[in-house]
Amino acid sequence: MTLKPSLFGLLASVLASAVVQAAEEYPPLPTWKCTSSGCVQQNTTIVLDKDSKFAKGSAGSRSTADYAAMGVTTSGNALTMYHYVKSNGALNAASPRVYLLGEDGKYVLMSLLNQEISVDVDFSSLPCGENGAFYLSEMDGKANGGSGQGYCDAQCPQRQCCNEMDMQVSPNSMASAFTGHPCKGSTCDSGGCGLNKYASGDRNFWGPGKTVDTSKPFTVITQFPASGGKLSRITRRYIQNGRQTDGGSINSCGNEGSTGGLSGMGAALGRGMVLAMSIWNDPAQQMAWLDSGNNGPCASGQGTPANIQSQHPDTHVIFSNIRWGDIGSTTKN
């Protein structure tokens, strides 16, 4: 005899499923939204990307242990991400990526046209070939943010293309650049319009003991000034030990007709973009496009994943004190 499930049983099952889906333990990461009048704390959290291989819980129902298994922890307003984690008695590459969530469990859409964003960073343990990225993706705000879904960028992973603004594109302690990647439909500027001070001839700007001393924490400010409702340039500044340093500006960004150019990048910033943070390395190119040859001081082969894992198994990045809002407001105090 086959018994049909009762309505009560079905409801109980649905409710239980809802509880599981709502049970993810999102690590808190308070941020601040600022105006000329001051900054207001936002009760934000982070969520792992849905494809996080060492997290045992399914996306939407992960525990803090799952975040730790992926090398991700928070403390106060600081996020720490380790590249390598112990799993099954061995050291493995976790390469975590996380996104910022609002109190409503949805992605925070940062509208940054004619605004700025600042973050305190510690890149001191990131060697040649390593990458601690702090960037914006025009992910779908309606995607299931609570499960870390909907990722896209200008490299079109799994054919998911969208505007990308790399505010710290793949920086490590030896080299850095910031780069806009506008898209028009599925046609993206994958190479982007970037500024690398080393490649521009300033070999003493970035690194341990240099103008921006990467052996110590510092603040990175990225500004997106607009004129007539259109992005006019992308500007970078640094603050370290109370001293402000000009990091340069990007004044154009590729072909407006094919990829949208600077104005397209500005339009995406105006619509709102999702903050993503990650740590990874590059088996194919060993990050040479960032930190070796004319782009940085690292030697050929120095940035191989095998070398990083053996010589720098504890490599990690720390992002903290994230603030966004009116230009000039986020570092006012």
Image (cartoon, rainbow, N blue to C red):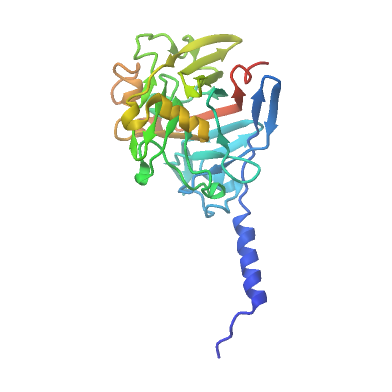
Q: Front-most of 239 and 75? A: 239
Name the residue: 65% across, 65% down: 15
Name the residue: 48% across, 9% down: 211
Residue placed farthest to the bottom in the image?
Answer: 1
- Residue 289 image position (x, y, % from top left): 32, 25
Q: Front-most of 301 and 233? A: 233
Residue 314 visible here: no
Q: Front-most of 99 and 183? A: 183
Q: How many marks?
A: 0
Name the residue: 58% across, 19% down: 327
Residue placed farthest to the front in the image?
Answer: 228
Work out whether 40 lies above or below 13.
Answer: above
Name the residue: 31% across, 31% down: 258
Looking at the rendered image, the quarter that the C terminus falls into is top right
Work out whether 322 lies above or below 63.
Answer: above
Q: Residue 76: name its quadrant.
A: top right
- Residue 271 image position (x, y, % from top left): 51, 35
Q: Is residue 304 left or right of residue 204?
A: left
Residue 140 visible here: yes
Looking at the rendered image, the quarter that the N terminus falls into is bottom right
Q: Residue 253: name its quadrant.
A: top left
Q: Is residue 255 left or right of residue 16?
A: left
Q: Front-most of 5 and 93? A: 5
Q: Is residue 7 left or right of residue 51?
A: right
- Residue 132 image position (x, y, % from top left): 46, 29
- Residue 247 image position (x, y, % from top left): 47, 13
